[in-house]
Image: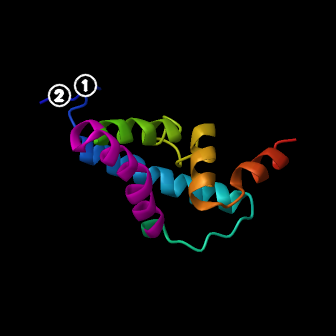
Amino acid sequence: MMTANHSCLPVEVRTAVYRRALAQGYLNACKNLGITVSATLDELQMTIALELEGFYVRRHGPDAGMEMACTMLGDMVEPDLLTAPPRLTQLGVTMMDELFRSQLAAASRITMH
């Protein structure tokens, strides 16, 4: 069965790929900015699943919520994640900064001069 975005992959698989790319993109961005992250890749992924994905599932139910969460996660990483190292979009920077309170958004604005 095809989903709303016409992917042949189940929403759970797409969400897992975006979740991992988002977590890795966040670690990459922090490293590039000299920000130390105390969480592991797996811990970041778990927090993303519980907080971001969980929000949509609680609010909209399992089916619609997972589709919405998957879309949100996809919007948080650059679309070339299959051919380049994962990178955050501006939305990704903002959301991950809110979630982990790393000051990533402020640091990235300072270094962009």
For the N terminus, the quadrant is: top left
Q: Tell whether position 33 is magenta.
A: no
- Residue 77 seen in this snapshot: no
In which quadrant of the rendered image does the C terminus lie? top right
Please provide percent x and percent y for residue 18: 40, 46
Q: Secondary structure at mark 2?
A: loop
Q: CA distance from mark 2 to mark 1?
A: 5 Å
Say which residue appears at 66% left-offset and 59% top-offset: 30
State which quadrant residue 91 falls in.
top right
**Horizontal placement of 22 versus 93: left or right?**
left
Label pair 2/1, CB-CB below 8 angstroms: yes
Amino acid on which the number 2 mark rests in the picture: Met
Q: Position of residue 14 (x, y in %)?
A: 31, 43
User: Which stretch is magenta?
Assistant: 43-64
Instruction: Point out the residue furthest to the front here.
Output: 59
**On the rendered structure, is 9 left or right of 108?**
left
Residue at point 84% right, 48% down?
A: 110
Q: Amino acid at mark 1?
A: His
Q: Residues within 10 Å of mark 1 (few under 14, many from 20)?
A: few
Which corner quadrant of the image does residue 67 belong to? Answer: top left
Between residue 113 and residue 81, name the one nearer to us.
Answer: 113
Q: In the shown orientation, is residue 46 left or right of residue 28?
A: left
Query: On the image, numbered disc 1 is attached to which residue?
Result: 6
Residue 52 highlighted magenta (yes or no): yes
Residue that carries the numbered disc 2 in the rendered image = 2
